[in-house]
Image (tube, rainbow, N blue to C red):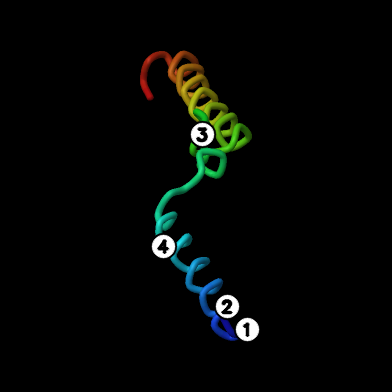
Amino acid sequence: MTTSKRLAEKKVAKFQKNITRRGSVPETSTKKGNDYPVGPIVLGFFIFVVIGSSLFQIIRTATSGGMA
């Protein structure tokens, strides 16, 4: 077998090996976990705004005697 033939066979074998593995993703590269879609700071800020605005509305309603 000549050198070029050997190199060609080696290249074909490597290509065939890649063809059989195509599409299979290893388990370690996939992301697993129950993470929130937003960060904890954004979530905390949102909760602060919602609860703060509701408390502000309750205090405003109580001080105006029920007439908003």
Inspect the image, locate mark 4, and give the three-letter code of the amino acid beneath it: Ile
Disc on the earlier residue, 3 or 2: 2
Measured as percent of width and height from the top left, residue 24 is found at: 43, 49
Which numbered tag is attached to residue 32? Answer: 3
Pair 3/2: label in front: 2
Say what amino acid the circle numbered 2 marks.
Answer: Arg
Secondary structure state at the residue bearing disc 2: helix
Quarter of the image with the N terminus is bottom right
Say which label, 3 or 4, has the lower sequence index.
4
Quarter where residue 64 is shown:
top left
Rendering coords of residue 23 (x, y %): 40, 54
Q: CA distance from mark 4 to mark 1?
A: 24 Å
Tag on residue 3?
A: 1
Quarter that holds the C terminus: top left
Q: Is residue 64 above or below residue 6?
A: above
Location of mark 2 (residue): 6
* Pair 4/1: label in front: 1
Q: What is the spatial separation of the Cα atoms under label 2 and label 1, in whole angstroms?
A: 5 Å
Disc 3 on helix, strand or loop?
Answer: loop
Residue shown at 46% from the left, 13% from the top: 62
Dot placed on the residue nearer the N-terminal end, 4 or 1: 1
Which residue is disc 4 drawn over? 19
